[in-house]
Amino acid sequence: MLRHFQYYLFCLALLLCTFHASATTTVEAIGQALIYNNDLGKAREQAITDAKQQASLQAAAFISSTQQLEDGILEIDNMRISTMSALTNIEIIEEKLVGNKLHVRIRADIDAQTTCANGNTGNSFRKTVAIAAFPLEHQDQANLGSLRNIESGIASLLKKRLSANDGITALNAGHLSLYTQLGTATTRQLDNGALTTMMAHTQQLDSQFIISGIIRDLSMQDPAAINEKNWLIDTYNQLDFKSSKHLRHFSLELFIHDGFSGTLLEQKNYETQGRWNHKLTEKIGFATPAFFTSEYGKNVQKLLDDISADVVQSLRCLPFSARITRTEDNNLWINAGKESGLKRGDKLTVYRKTMFYNQTNLPTTELINTRLTMIVDEIQPTVVKGHINGLTSQHNIQQDDIVMFW
């Protein structure tokens, strides 16, 4: 029976390889349930639930990287239905009694626009993200409107937006500036002269991902428009408030780093502009009501919405991982808690974290797949405990190694 189920999953995997989640897809699925004590209503409810699971399986199941073939049969370490594939317009199209078993056929639409570039559908575990400060490359540009608080303010606004997503736990680290050479960030030079995009000292944040960036430009398109000495021309400029001479630029470069290795995962530029009609002497401040009532503020706000949506999509497609904080016998403890969404029985792959130096003496972190599976046993508010098959000392699994779910 087990091998038949494994064969079914293997066929499903082949089907998913040809599935392109680019639009809403309609699927049909059959669920079944036994009828106990002539309770047809309860059986119908259970059969519909079973049918929903089968429908979700068709579009959203994915097989983890720990899968392997043994004797020609696909063995599954991890399989989870992604909550990102939502069933809508569910319709019962057939009910049939076979003995004491009720069979229900349903039709449903699946919003399948969840496929990632790597072919996965993403996973539903919550990922921790620390959002650091966004320093200004040109400090004097913040003088106009008194926008000095923008460096920590960007982090606060992104934290608020990302926290609204079920798959992310966002932490505000806006008091931390991670770069000393803003003009060349994220590239930094090591003592031996080598260049790297690896972020140093990521362990202090103890977060799975780190979001940071540089504010590249807050300049006016026409600086003379707000610095005009001639009273007559200045009055004309103020009356001509719709002119493009009042446009102000906003340019930001965003970085996503892996919090355990310091590796740069993604780098992207964002920019917008809008009219800035405030007077030179007005102290508006960043993210104040006065700031957001201007065209410039509204456009910046919309850009931050776009940035947040991009970050959510990027993080959803990256694996869930957590740091091993303690080992004992065959038990592991990881720095994840109840909020992560992990449940008893979930399976995570164990990776050994090693540091080596390449031919230019550049320190590099490598994660080695041990082919071991941690099975979750206990979930507490701030820690998760699990076990592996064998002793951790046998496999040289230590504190600061990583568990991962693709």
Image (cartoon, rainbow, N blue to C red):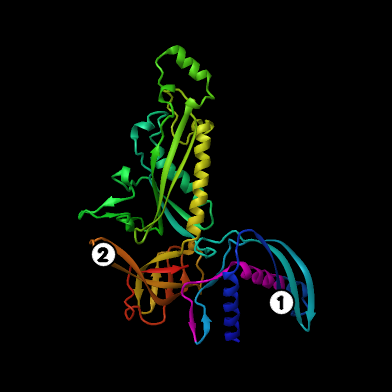
The residue under label 1 is 32
The numbered mark at residue 321 is none
Q: Kindly state the secondary structure of the residue where label 2 is placed.
A: loop
Residue farthest toward the left in the current orientation of the protein: 192
The residue under label 2 is 358
The percent position of residue 361, horizontal first and vertical second, equals 23, 62
Total labels: the figure holds: 2
Prevalent SS, magenta region: helix
Lateral position of residue 100 relative to residue 117, left or right: right
The percent position of residue 85, horizontal first and vertical second, equals 61, 62
Q: Kindly state the secondary structure of the residue where label 1 is placed.
A: strand
- Magenta stretch: includes residue 57: yes
Find the magenta span and give its range: 46-70
- On screen, 276 above or below 265? above
Distance of label 2 from label 1 (alpha carbons): 57 Å
Residue under the point 41% across and 77% down: 371
Residue under the point 53% across and 54% down: 165
Is residue 37 visible from the viewing direction of this image? Answer: yes
Callout 2 amino acid:
Asn
Question: Which of 261/41 is in front?
Answer: 261
**Image quarter hosting the N terminus:** bottom right
Where is residue 330, by image quadrant?
A: bottom left
Is residue 400 visible from the viewing direction of this image? Answer: no
